[in-house]
Amino acid sequence: MSRRSLPSAASPARLTPNRSAVWLTDPGVCAARRRCGRKLAMMTRRSFLSALGAAPLIGQNRRPPNVLFLAADDMNNALGCYGHPRVKSPNIDALAARGVLFERAYCQFPLCGPSRASLLLGLRPDTTRVLANNVDFRDFHPNAVTLPQLFKNNGWFSAREGKMFHMNVPGGVGTPQFQDEPSWNHSVSPPGLEAKTPGEGRRLNPPGVNFGMQWIAAATDKGQADTTAADHALALLEQHKDRPFFLAVGFVRPHLPFVAPSRFYDLYPLNTIEVPKNPPNDLDDIPEASKSVRPHLWHNMKMDEPRIREALRGYWASTSYMDDQLGRVMRGMEKMGLASNTIVVFWGDHGWHLGEHTRWQKMSLMEESARVPLIIAAPGRKGNGKPSRALVEFVDVYPTLAELCGIRPPDNLEGQSLAPLLDNPARPFKKAAFTQLLYEDITGRSVRTARYRYIRWEGRGGGEELYDHETDPREFTNLALKPEARRVLEEHRKILDAGWRAARA
């Protein structure tokens, strides 16, 4: 486990955003040198090339780009733009149409706290040492520079509305829990009624099982944290539209409890919802270590089919409600004339099982838990409107935004900028994406390649899993037990052992 100290807040190059300094325009390097003068000479080669990479966006406006950073909690890929046949997500779909949708993006740890720390630090969980919720990364790295802090240090107005780093939901909603005040000029955790919301609903857990499975169809969206976060975000956009900003808006839905106005529940009549179909022997070839990670989440949490339908309806309704609030922020940004100079990023912190393999919620290493939604819309990029099937990871987001905005990032980031994919979504990129988890005495590590997923377990008897996504995209057949898959298994063992550095493009 790496114990490298992270760079201090003073270490990134401070490229102060102003019109006379480092922002390069299309006519070329000579014109850039005339504008930048002495300050350009002080730039490192890396930051100069980064600024050149951002030139198409910056040159149109002659001011630094803004960043609108939109996060959803427990959001899987059940969205219209990802091909889901039922879920209504018109605003996220519209964002995907104007940017690059990453079809194969993966989190580094399928749990809120570790995943968010990894993305916002640009470092993998073994480096952050955040391997559970309710862990403050600054206990290990007091001088770390987070993604929003990098923008703050370089002159952007850095603001947070809602959940960005870990926050317990619903108990921590409305509190500053783990939201890392050094990262922000402005930091607010909107309160919400959550399970106290008046309306129709019920708890779905059968007797003896209590893991927050509850839905509530409210009369209005008043009193909900996501509505308030959108309200506050719109006010901040209006107040700070004349200066560069990094505005992070963290929505808490579709995290449990499934609270949404009744009009979103009306989109999904119960009698039209189908329960996921799983082979009767689906779990027979899965190692006990895998089934021992949050074991109460298997076997549909003992829910019967009517409860399963209600749970699906609650998740989808919560997703559509969150999408509606995201749309309000997007429309407000556009009405203020900010869209042409604002990079918009949408991400969900990890996937979420909805009954696949009879599993629910997060903390597995299967596709439904490790795969995440990720969309980046940067004005002027040639790839906008096209999806990318490149294997990408959450640790790639930090270096991407630093490059797009011409800021020198910390030297020890563990991701790879996605900027080239924003111009050519089909270009070759990484050979593999890595996800890991820790639960009690069980460690799991997974590698996703273009065709296969390989999982290795340690503790509780260990074991391996191997799935062929070309012939078995739902991961029903564990090929690690098949002699005919021995060669592929050995190849993927080597990929996992070689680590993420060997998988870089």
Image (cartoon, rainbow, N blue to C red):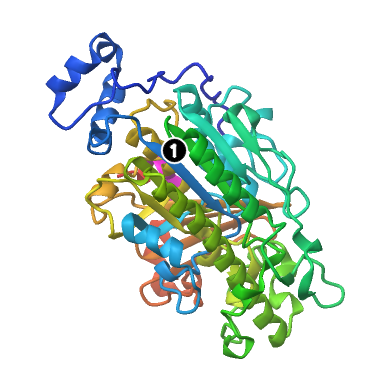
Residue 259 is situated, as x and y percent measured from the top left of the image, at 69, 66
Which residue appears at 43% of the width and 40% of the height?
Answer: 67
Q: How far across and how far down the image is residue 81, in percent? A: 40, 67
Q: Residue furthest right?
A: 208
Is 232 inside the magenta-drawn segment? no
Q: Nearer the viewer, residue 426 or 176?
A: 176
Relative vertical location of residue 319 with respect to residue 149 in this rendering, above or below: below
Q: Is residue 65 left or right of residue 11?
A: left
Image quadrant containing the C terminus: top left
The picture quadrant where one finds residue 94 is bottom left
Three-letter residue code for mark 1: Tyr
User: Left or right: where does residue 123 sit relative to residue 191?
Assistant: left
The boundaries of the magenta stretch are: 494-501
**In this rendering, would 384 be left or right of 271?**
left
Relative side of 411 to 444, left or right: left
Query: Residue at coordinates 60% horizontally, 62% vertically from top-left?
Result: 364
Q: Residues within 10 Å of mark 1 (few under 14, many from 20)?
A: many
Q: Residue at the spot x=55%, y=32% of the render?
A: 2
Residue 173 position within the rendered picture, expressed as x and y whole percent measured from the top left: 73, 49
Q: Which residue is mark 1?
A: 398
* Image vertical order of residue 426 relative to residue 119, above or below: below
